[in-house]
Amino acid sequence: MFAFFLMLALATPPQAPAAPAQPDVATAERLFATGRFRDAEVVAEALTRAKPDDASIWSLLGNARFAQKDYEPAAAAFERALAIQPKERVILDNLGCSYFLSQHLDQARAAFERSLTTDADGSRAHSFLARIAALRDDSATAEREFEASIRAKNVDSLAPFHFGLYLMQERRIEDASKQFEHALRVDPDFAGAHMNLALALQRRGDPARADFHMRRFRELTEAELSDDRKRLRVTALLRDVQREYEASNIDAALALALEAARVAPEAPVVHQTLSRLYQLKGNAELATKELDIARSLAEPRK
Amino acid sequence: MKRLAAALAAVGSACGAGEPAAPAPPADFVHLRDARARTGIDYVHRNGPTARKLLIETMGGGVTVFDFDGDGRQDLYFVDSGEVPRTNAEQARGGNRLYRNLGHWKFEDVTAGSGTEGRGYMMGAIAADYDGDGDADLYVTACGSNSLLRNDGGGKFTDVTKQAGCDDTRWSTGAAFFDYDGDGDLDLFVQNYLDYEVSKQRPYFREDIPIYPPPDLFDPVASALFRNRGDGTFEDVSISSGIAAHLAKGLGVVTGDFDFDGDVDIFCANDVSPNFLFANQGDDTFREVGAISGSAYSAEGRELSGMGADAADLDGDGLSEIVVTNFSGESNSIYRCEGGLTYTEISSRSGTWELSMPCLGFGTRLVDLDNDGARDWIVANGHIYDNAEKVLTGTSYRQPMLLFQGLGNARFRDRAPDQPEEFRAVRVARGLAVADLDDDGDLDVVVGILGGAPLLLENVGGERNSWIAVRCVGTRGNTSAIGAQVTVEAGGRTQVSEVRTAASYLSQSDLRQFFGLDEAEKVERIRVRWPNGAVEEALDVSARRHLTFVEGSGLQK
C-alpha cells in the first residue's frame, strides 16, 4: 500500500541542506524526502542531463514534479523512465496517476493496463481503471474493475473507498457502507472514509454511528487549539494533508504535516498525522516517536 | 424534422437580410452569440490592478439583471470595482452603470443622476423590493461599506444604507434578499469573504514571482443576517440566528426551500473552507448542516475552493441539486439531492469532470437554454493569478467558458465546441447572469469580465422549442415574490423553479421563471406556491407566452 515513493529515501529532519554545486542522487532524494520538491526537481533535471539513461533519476524527476502537482511534466519524466525500464510497475502506476490527474484518461488507462501486465493483481491499477470507466459512464467495466481492486492481495485503502463512492452515486448505500468499512479496516485513520461512512449511515437511519464517524472525520482533519487563527491554519493544512493522501502523494502530505507541526507543535492531531504518514512510508521509528508525542500531548496535565 | 426545418429557416433568414451569414445553431442546441456591439453598452469593468497584487483586484465583476423602471424589460446593472483604495474605509465615488433596456437589443445608459454609481471598491449586487413599494431596490457589496440603494421611482435611487442599518464593513461578496422568518417582507443575507484590510496586505511571492496571495493567508469571517423590521430598517440578527457562529471564506450564495418544509434555507459556497448549508429551523434560527448533508466537501472529504453556486432540479425528481464552481485542479461540484437536506456528490459521473478540472470557475447558472425541458449548465471561468501560466501548470489566466447541455438525468454533454468563436474565446470572466433580454422566450446570458467589457450573449435557437415564462408579483410586501415556487406540468414532465435573488457569483438573474417545454404547445397546469404557503393554479395554458401571476388573484389575463 502507498508504495508510490517507497523506493525513495525516507524523510529526515526538516532542515535540509541547500542544493550543492555538484548535484548527486542522494541530495535530490534528500531534498525530495524533506518536502523541497522544487529543489529536488532542479537537481534531478541536472542529473538527467548527466545520466540520461538512468531510469531511477527520471522517476525521481517525475515524483518531484508530481508532488508539485505538475502532472503533465511528471508524466513526461515517467515516460522517459519507462522507455529505459518498460516493465517497472511502480513507475507505470505513477504515470497512470499523472495522466489521470491531468485529465488524459486514455493515456492513464493505457498506463494502468500496462501496469496490470506486470502485476495482474494490482489493486491501485484496477481501482483507477474502474474510476476511468465510471467517468466514461461505463458502469459494467467500472464495477468489474472495482471488484478486482478490492480482491487484490495487497488492497490499497483507496480501492474500497472509491468503490464506496461509486456505490453511493449508484444509491447502493448499504453496499457503499461495507466498502467504507473495508477502507477503514485497511486504514483506520482514513478521514474521507469516516466522512462517507457517516453520510451512508445517516441515510440508513443510524444517526448515532453516523455522528461517531463524522466526529472521527473532524478529529482527523481539524485541530483543537485555543488560538483561533492557529486552529484554522492548522486545520487547513491537515485538510491539505488529506487531499495529498487521497491523491497518493504521500511526500507532499508529509511536507504539509511537517508545516502543521511547525505552526502548532502542541496539537496532538498533527503528531498523529505525522505518525501515520511515517508509517505509510515505512519509517517505524519516526512513526512511533510521533505517536508518543501525540499521546503525551493528549494526556491531561497534572 | 421540426428542429431541422427551423435551423434551415434561420440560415435562410440571415442570408436573406444581406448580412454575413452567421452559422446556424446546431439542430439540437443553441448558439450564444455576442450581441454587445449592437447594444450601445460601452461599460468596461475597472479593477485597478497594482504591482502589489492586492487580492481584491482579482475578485470583482458582478452583473445584475432587474427591471428597475417596471416597464417589463430586463435592465442591466454592472458593478464596477474601480481604483484600489488606500484603506477599506476609503469610499471613492463608484463607476457602476445602469442601462435601461429599450428592446431589440438596444440599451441606454441612464446612470447619470440615477444615484446608482455606488461607492467604494465594489463586488456585486442584488435587486428586489425590500420596502414593499413595488419597485426593485439594490444592495451592492464591497470591500468596505456596502450600499442599500432605495429605488424612489423615476429612475432615481437613494443611498439609505445608514438609516436602514444593514451595512457590513467587511469584505462582502454574495448577498441574498429572502424572507427567512416568513413575516412577508424581505430580509437580507450578506456573505463575507476574508478578514482583509487593503492597507495591510503584504506582497506575496511564489518562487520569487509576485502573485495574488492565496486566501489561506487570511482569516475567515462570518456572514451577516439582517431582519427586515417592515419599516424600511433592518435589525442585525447574525448572532441570534446562529449565522455568526460559523466562520468561512464565503463567495457564492444560493437560497431556497431545499427540503420543501416551507421555509428558506441558505447554501454558501466557501473558498478553501467547507461549504455551509444553513437549515432554517422555522424559529428564526439556522442550523449549519453542511457536513452531514454531504454538501460541504468533495466526495473524497476534501474542502474545496467554492466560488459560485446555483440550485435546480437536474434529474427530474423535483428536488434541487446544488452546483458549485471551484478552483483549477478541482472539478466543479454537483451535489445530487437525495431528499430532505441530503446530498451525494456526483460530478465524476456527470460528464463535466474532465472539462471543469483545469478551469477556475466563478459565475454559473443551471438554466434551460434550449427549452428542451432539461437544465443546461453554463460556467464563467478565469484564473485569479494574472501570471498563472508562470506559476502553475495545466491552467491559464484567461480561460474559455464551459457550456453543457443537460440530458435530464444529471448528466451533461459538452456544447462549447459548437459555439461561435466569440463564445469560445478565452477571458477572465467573473459574474454571470441569465435573462430573456429580448423577450423572445429563451434565456440570454450576461457575463462580467474582470477589467474588461462584458459579454452579452444572445441565445439563438432556444426559441425553436416551446416555452413558458412566469412572472410572480407579490402583494404582501415582498412584491418581488422572492421565495415563490413555480411548478409547471406539460408534455408529461413536471418542473419546479423558485424565485431567488441569489445564485451564481456576485450576480443576479431575471426573476421571471422560464420553463422549456420541448414540443408541448400547451401547459396542463401551472402552480405557484407563494412564500406564505398559499397556492394558486392555472390550467390548460397556451405555451410560448410570458405570464404574470399576482398573489391573491392568480394568472392575469
Image (tube, coloured by chain):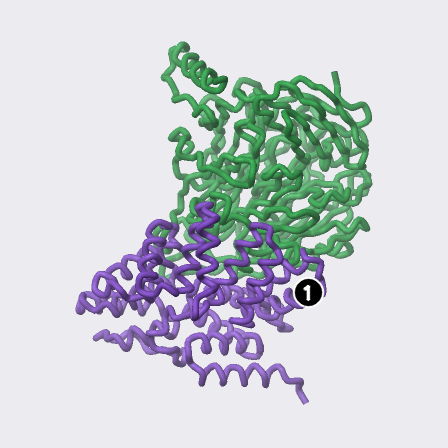
Chain colours: A purple, B green
* Residue B55 visible in the current orientation: yes
Pick the front one: B528 or B161: B528
Label 1 sits on what residue type? Answer: Asp
Q: Is residue B433 above or below residue A86?
A: above
Q: Quadrant of residue B248?
A: bottom right
Q: Quadrant of residue B495?
A: top right
Q: Is residue B186 above or below residue B6?
A: below
What residue is shown at x 63% (from left), y 46% (from top)? B337
What residue is shown at x 58% (from left), y 30% (from top)? B373
Q: Tag 1's secondary structure? A: helix
Pick the front one: A102 or B501: A102
Can you give x and y, in whole percent of width and height, for residue A198 in the image? 64, 62
Q: Which residue is mark 1?
A: A211
Can you give x and y, in whole percent of width and height, for residue B268 in the image? 62, 50
What residue is shown at x 58% (from left), y 66% (from top)? A181
Q: Chain of mark 1?
A: A
* Residue B198 visible in the current orientation: no
For label 1, count other residues whose C-alpha is less than 10 Å away and answer few (under 14), some (14-19) or many (20+): some
Q: Is residue B187 left or right of residue B328?
A: right
